[in-house]
Image (spheres, rainbow, N blue to C red):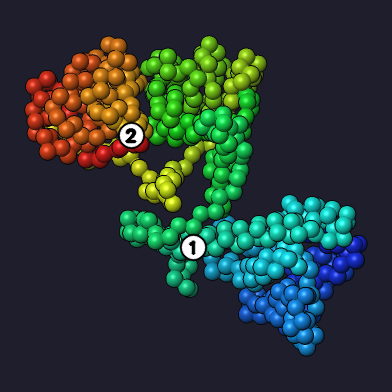
Amino acid sequence: MYDKTGVVDLARALHELGWDLVSSGGTARVIAEAGVPVTDVADLTGVPAILGHRVVTLHPKVHGGILADPTNAEHRADMAEYGIEPIDLVVANLYPFSAEPSIELIDIGGPAMVRAAAKNYAFVGIVTDPGRYDEVVAELRAGGALSADTKRGLARDAFAHTAAYDAEIVAWFDAGMPAPGSAGTGADAAASGDADADALPETLSLTLDRAQVLRYGENPHQVGARYTTRGRQGWWETATQHGGKEMSYLNVYDTEAAWQLVHALGDGPAAVVIKHANPCGVAVADDILTAYTRAHECDPVSAFGGIVAVNRPVTLAVAEALGPVFTEVLVAPAYDADALALLQEKKKNLRILEATAPAVPELTLRSVDGGYLVQTADHVTVDRSAWRVVTDRQPTEAEWADLELAWRVVAKVTSNAIVLVSDGAAVGIGCGQQNRRDAGKLAGEKAAGRAAGGVYASDAFFPFPDGLDGAVEAGATCVIQPGGSIRDDEVIAAANEHGLAMVLTGERHFRH
């Protein structure tokens, strides 16, 4: 047993109930030092721990006692012949493999005992979670034995425990674990090889633990919850909610989108407003108040009931600016004391989250009938040296800054997407349209004249020259897009005709 939390209290309670205790090595020592009688498993089997502790409990007197069916005459005969005593309760948990993956942290005896007890749950209780010790003791005190339903539930949890453990090991192999005898780690090996090799392994083993029951799902008649991947910890696990209602499914979904985007905008102060997983406001500035104010100004109508994310501590001035705006969630790295007090006093329903920076998931999954669609994460490349200016006119330095911001933002907008940016802020966003012209028209309407001299970003190439009409009508002077259309030459010619600068990135960012 690796996690010895509560084991002494459990052992003492079982002893008081008349149970005989058998334990291995370190756990037996801890129990004995507490004054509770216990037999070391080595005394039971007559064999000490061998092979550097690789073999401790792998013995017929252990596994025979766990797997025996007392109603089976053949089993009873074997037990009598070989001196095997029945074992009625197994308490075990496994080495924390994910904490520091290595060959020696691949537990063998532990999973074998856990699975054996779970298989024989009709006669044996198996407890793998220290958090259930009190429940087990209470039931034993009340009735002298565990009920069939309890043992079945414990067995289910036991198989989930070993399945998750094996999944962690499989993930380690998939990440490129070192060869036997190597001093490197799986992460080191993966980093040193081809980054694209085996990006999507033949099998994926996922174990998800329910971490948070949500107010409801995407709609109030749906049930929703947030699950975590076993062995992984995301920013949600360390986030603090300082106020407001419980989170709903969409609150979590949209907040994740906001928090990811605001951390993808560079190192300067930045603010994002998200509505239905799409940005309706984005800005970077010299200070966080200006960034938030300009992000909100992009589309104040859509910002109603939105999610706000900022990458700097929330000041009193930012809290005051938020005051008149109905906002569902505010997420930030920290809050000034007076800002937090004001928000808690004036905006009782606002979910106020304090969080660390997020990591970008390695894979994205979506359910389809009978399975999942899986893909690697969409990493946005912002590299002027890799981009091509294909028009007669070159972008100015100020335009380059807006081009970079627009490219970061359009990659996070549902396709077909057009984003208009001017002077460090999005001024018009057209998302989720079936054709690119409509996306551009929508972005221009939202910009309402504010895009003059700005940039026009498209998440995919323009199939026809008329895709530039939205840029021209909005008064943009630069365009950024992936390129790759069979009519690129015609699109470039149209850009030159209108005096636009155009940058091709060579990287499409469809988002559905």
Residue 72 seen by the camera: yes
Q: Quadrant of residue 11?
A: bottom right
Q: Quadrant of residue 105?
A: bottom right
Question: Is residue 83 shown above or below 403?
Answer: below
Q: Is residue 219 above or below residue 128?
A: above
The label number, if any, that marks residue 411 in the structure image: 2
Q: Nearer the viewer, residue 449 or 119?
A: 119
Q: Is residue 495 left or right of residue 79?
A: left
| Amino acid at dot 2 | Ala
Work out whether mark 2 precedes mark 1 in sequence or the reverse, and give the earlier one.
Answer: 1
Q: Residue at x 42, y 44 (%)?
A: 366
Which residue sits furthest bottom? 81
**Residue 111 percent across, percent down from the top left:** 63, 67
Q: Which residue is depicted at the point 56% across and 50% down? A: 208
Which of these two is toward me, 89 or 1?
Answer: 89
Residue type, numbered disc 1 = Val
User: CA–CA distance between discs 2 and 1?
Assistant: 32 Å
- Considering the numbered disc 1 on the image, is that residue within a helix, a strand or a loop? helix
Q: Are marks 2 and 1 in contact (CB under 8 Å)?
A: no
Bin the neighbour count of mark 2 within 10 Å (Cα to Cα): few under 14, some 14-19, many 20 and up: many
Q: Secondary structure at mark 2?
A: loop
Q: Residue at x 61, y 20 (%)?
A: 349
Quadrant of the frame with the C terminus: top left
Q: Is residue 297 above or below residue 512?
A: above
Report the number of numbered marks: 2
- Give percent across and percent down for residue 444: 27, 17
Q: Is residue 363 visible?
A: no
Q: Quadrant of residue 163?
A: bottom right
**Residue occupying the point 49% across, 57% down:** 205
Q: Quadrant of the N terminus?
A: bottom right
Residue count near mark 1 (Cα–Cα under 10 Å), binned few <14, some 14–19, many ≥20: some
Task: Name the residue carrying label 1.
Answer: 170
